[in-house]
Structure formats: C-alpha cells, structure tokens
Amino acid sequence: MVRRHTPAMRPRRAGFAFLSVLAWTAISALATGAVAHVWSQQARREREQQLLRVGAIYAHAIDNYRSMSPGTVKHYPATLDDLLLDTRFVHAVRHLRRPYTDPVNPGKPWGLLHDANGRITGVHSLSQDEPVSKIAPVVDGVRLDSATRYSQWRFFREPQP
C-alpha cells in the first residue's frame, strides 16, 4: 500500500533546502563583503606607500636640480618639466625619468610648494582623503608630520648651504 500525503499530513521538512540555500547565500555575501573591505584597505595602503616613494623621488629630483645649478646662485626649477630635461648645461640632464602621477589622486596634478621667487621647492598631493597610517611616516630619513589628510604631507628637502 502506497502512502499518500494529504496537505494536512505534509512532512515538516518541506522548505528546508530553500532555507539552507538562503542561509548559505547570506553567509557568502557577508564573507564577500569582509574580503572586499580588507582588499580595499590593502589597496589604499599600497597607494599610500607609492605616494611616499614618488614624493621622495620628486623631493630628491628638485634638490638635485638646485644643487647642480651652474654658478654660485642656486635655483629651483620653474616647472616640473624642467626636471625631465634640464637644458642649462651643454649636454641635457634628466633629474626624473618620467613624470609621475599622484598615486592617491590619479588624474589630478600635484600640488606645488613655491619659494619667494615662485620656483618649485617641493610637491604634495591634493587628495583630501585621510591616510590609512596614523603614524607619521619616515621618508629618506625625514619624518613627515602626522597629518589628517594626504594633502598635508609635504615632500621637499631643506637646502644645503
């Protein structure tokens, strides 16, 4: 004899598979969200480290441009392009291989620090984002001040007499 279930006698397991798939989907979504957050933070840390590296490269190139100035009066570059091809000498000098973009603010120009004559003494990011690292970073042996925005990190070198 074959037992037939009437609606009143339906087993209580009906819908269990649907609920387990629904729970699995919710757990997967939460895990994916957590992984995406960690990945995003790691990408921000890498861009921050890149900013420190590129900022130090610019500070070194600007200092090199000034220190190599012919004659006794030392000048800073008038534009960042002067670092790419310095024509003050018989043979062209390159202080930078190529122009570097701001890693934390891609597609935007660098902020420039100027001296009293309007020449470039350093660079900084224009990004108003908050740094991931709350500890003041050290670049080329110089500790950058603790800042609440990337735009407050200034990359320059004090001129040597």
Image: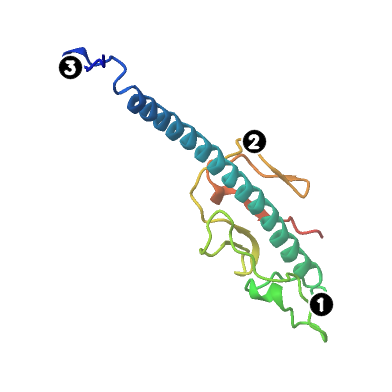
Q: Is residue 21 left or right of residue 105?
A: left
Q: Secondary structure at mark 1?
A: loop
Going by the numbered disc 2, the residue's amino acid type is Ile
Q: Which residue is mark 3?
A: 6
Whole-percent x, y for residue 66 in the image: 76, 68
Query: Looking at the image, can residue 131 be seen?
Result: no
Q: Which residue is mark 2?
A: 135
The quadrant of the picture occupied by the C terminus is: bottom right
Query: Looking at the image, can residue 4 be seen?
Result: yes
Q: Is residue 153 left or right of residue 108?
A: right
User: Mark 1 against mark 3, which lies toward the viewer?
Assistant: 3
What's the distance in space between the residues labelled 2 and 1, CA to CA?
Answer: 40 Å
Q: Secondary structure at mark 2?
A: loop
Front residue of 116/33: it is 33
Establish if 38 lies above or below 23.
below
Front residue of 136/104: it is 104
Q: Which residue is mark 1?
A: 70
- Residue that protrudes farthest toward the front in the picture: 1
Going by the numbered disc 3, the residue's amino acid type is Thr
Going by the numbered disc 1, the residue's amino acid type is Pro
Q: Secondary structure at mark 3?
A: loop
**Mark 3 or mark 1, which is nearer the start of the sequence?**
3
Whole-percent x, y for residue 147 in the image: 57, 41
Q: Is residue 127 left or right of residue 49?
A: left
What's the distance in space between the residues labelled 3 and 2, CA to CA?
Answer: 70 Å
What's the distance in space between the residues labelled 1 and 3, CA to CA?
Answer: 101 Å
- Residue 138: quadrant of the picture: top right
Pointer 2 and pointer 1: residues touching (CB < 8 Å)?
Answer: no
Whole-percent x, y for residue 32 in the image: 48, 37
